[in-house]
Amino acid sequence: MKILSSKNSAISSSMTLAITAKAKQLKQQGVDVVSFGAGEPDFNTPENIRTAACERITAGGIGYTEASGLPALKAAICEKLKTDNGLDYKPSQIVVSTGAKQSLFNTLQALCNPGDEVILPSPYWVSYYELIKLADAVPVIVETSAGSGFKPTAEDIESAVSEKTKAIILNSPNNPTGAVYDKALLEAIGAVAEKHDLYILSDEIYEKLIYGETHTSIASLSPDLYARTIVINGMSKAYAMTGWRIGYTASSEAIAKIMGNIQSHATSNPNTIAQYASIEALTGPQDTIEVMRKAFDERRLEMVKRIEAIPMLDCVVPKGAFYVMVDISKCIGKTFAGKVISNSMDFSAALLDDEKVAVIPGIAFNADRYVRLSYATSMENIIEGIDRIGAFCSKL
C-alpha cells in the first residue's frame, strides 16, 4: 500500500475531546465521574432559539443555502458586530462556517503559504497549533507566565517576528487561562503588527463571558488594524449552542472570498436549521446571556476559592471564559501508588484512576506543569470534584 499523507498523519487528535469522551464513557458504564473537561456550557440552548429552529423545520425551506451562509444571518452578524464591537462590516465580508474551529481553519488556509510562521502565545487552545500545521505553516510559540497573568507583552511578540512571519493569533478572553487583554496591550501588539505588516487572527468566542473586565476587539482600534484583522466568533459559548456548530469570520472582502471558495468545496454551507436558529439568537432577547454569565461567575469564584485552599495547588484568578489553569508544580516529583508524578499527563491519569475526576493535562496547551479545569458544570460538581482533587493531593 502507498504511504499515507505525511502532513496529516502528523496531526494529533484533540486531547480535550478525547478526555471528555473517556469521562462520558465511564459515566455510561456507571462510574461516578466528575468531569472538568471540555468547555461546553451545561445550560440548555435558550427556548426562543430552540423554538425558532422547530418552526423553521415545520415551515420548510431548509435546503442548501449559500456556501458562506444565509444573507439574513450575515446581516444579523454585521449588526451584532456594529452594536457590540463598534465594527462596520458588509455581508460580503462575513463567512459563516461549521463552528469557530472551521472559521479558524478557513482563515489559516486563506492566509498561509508553506513555511510561513504564525505567532502563538502560550498556553494556547489545543487546536491552534495543529490548525497552523494543517495550513503548511510553522507555529512560533511565545511563552507567557502566571506572573504576567498569562498575557504576552508587545516586546515578547516582536521578539518572535522573523522575515517569514505572516500572522499573530490572539485569543481574548483566553482558553485555557481566562486572561483578558486590555486595550493598552492590544494597541501595543497592534503596533507590532502594523510595523511588520502582519495579519491578526482575533478569536473572540468568549467575549460575552467576562468578569470585572471589558472586552475590546483589536479590529476596532484603528483603520489599519481593522484591515489586517480577521475577527473570529461564534454561537457556541454565549448562547449555549455548542452542538449547533455555527461560527463566523469578519475580514476584508478579499480574504472572505478565498475562505468562501475554500468552504464551497470543503463542506458547502453550514447547517441550515442552525443558521436560522442563530438569526434568532442574535436578533432575539439577550437576557439569557447575563443569566449564564452570572452563574459562571459564581462557579468561577467557588472553584478558585476551593483550589486555593489545597496546599499543593495554585491558580491565577481567570477574568474571562470558563476555565481555571491549576498549577500542579508542587505535585511534580511526588509519588502515587508507587509511581512518580512526572508531568501533567501522570497527574491527570492518576487523578482519574483514583478519584474519578477528569481534568485536561496542561501539556495539551504547552503548559505541562498545569491542568485545566472547566467550571462550565454545576456547583455541585465543582464542590464534589475539588474535594476529590484535594483528597488525591493529600495522598501524594
Image (spheres, helix red, strand yellow):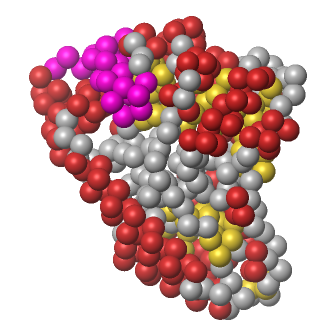
Taking the view exactly as shown, the residue that stands out farthest to the bottom is: 395
The x, y position of residue 135, in whole percent, is 71, 25
Q: Is residue 71 magenta?
A: yes
Quarter of the image where the N terminus is located: top right
The answer to whether 190 appears left or right of 61 in the picture is: right
The residue range painted magenta reads 60-87
Q: Residue at x 56, y 67 (%)?
A: 317
- Left or right: residue 247 compared with residue 80: right
What residue appears at the point 45 percent right and 19 percent down from the top-left corner?
Answer: 95
Q: Position of residue 169 (x, y in %)?
A: 66, 35
Q: Residue at x 44, y 58 (%)?
A: 212
Q: Is residue 271 visible?
A: no
Q: Is residue 337 visible?
A: yes
Q: Position of residue 99 (x, y in %)?
A: 46, 34
Taking depth in this image into account, of 101 and 307 the one nearest to the observer is 307
Q: Quadrant of residue 218?
A: top right
- Work out whether 29 lies above or below 383: above
Q: Is residue 90 left or right of residue 116?
A: left
Q: Residue 94 sits in which quadrant?
A: top left
| Residue situated in front as seen by the camera: 48 or 54 | 48
Image quarter of residue 2: top right
The residue located at (51%, 9%) in the rendering is 253
Task: List x then y, in percent, for residue 298.
Answer: 37, 69
